[in-house]
Amino acid sequence: MYVKTTILMLFILSMVLTSCNIGSKTYEVIWAEQSTSSEETIDSAIKRLSDAKIDFIIDDSGNILINERDLNKAVMCCS
């Protein structure tokens, strides 16, 4: 009985820790797409996002990605 309980608790703990992704940063929203935006538009978007202290990354394709949780803030400051 003790072994089954221990195994069950370890399994539940591993599932919880795996699904949490503690501390991970994901960028899910494309704010500016390189293929449809001019260089001036991309530069302006980078400046406005930086001024508003919104985290962003530029992917390998040149797209600007922001966190989904920052989408409303980006719309308010950078549209």
Image (cartoon, helix red, strand yellow):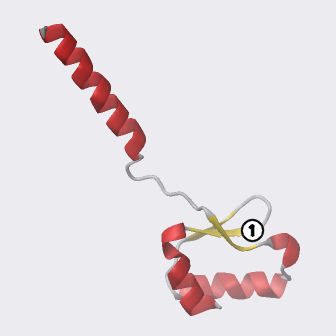
Report x, y in % for residue 11. Answer: 31, 24
Residue depicted at 58% across the width and 62% down the height: 27
Give the residue at mark 1.
Answer: 63
Q: Residues within 10 Å of mark 1 (few under 14, many from 20)?
A: some
Q: Is residue 34 left or right of residue 73?
A: right
Name the quarter where the C terminus is drawn.
bottom right
In terms of depth relative to the viewer, which is nearer, 76 or 54? 76
Which residue is the extreme one toward the left? Answer: 2
User: Can you tell which quarter of the image residue 12 is in?
Assistant: top left
Residue depicted at 66% across the width and 81% down the height: 46
Identity, as a three-letter code, of the amino acid under mark 1: Asn
Q: Is residue 79 left or right of residue 69?
A: right
Report x, y in % for residue 20. Answer: 38, 45
**Above or below — where is 24 with respect to 19?**
below
Query: Label 1's element?
Result: loop
Which residue is the extreme one toward the front? Answer: 1
In terms of depth relative to the viewer, which is nearer, 15 or 66? 15
Name the quarter where the N terminus is drawn.
top left
How many numbered markers are drawn? 1
Report x, y in % for residue 64. Answer: 69, 71
Residue depicted at 78% across the width and 86% down the height: 41
User: Can you tell which quarter of the image residue 37 is in?
Assistant: bottom right
Residue depicted at 80% across the width and 61% down the height: 61
Q: Is residue 24 left or right of residue 62?
A: left
Q: Is residue 76 left or right of residue 64?
A: left
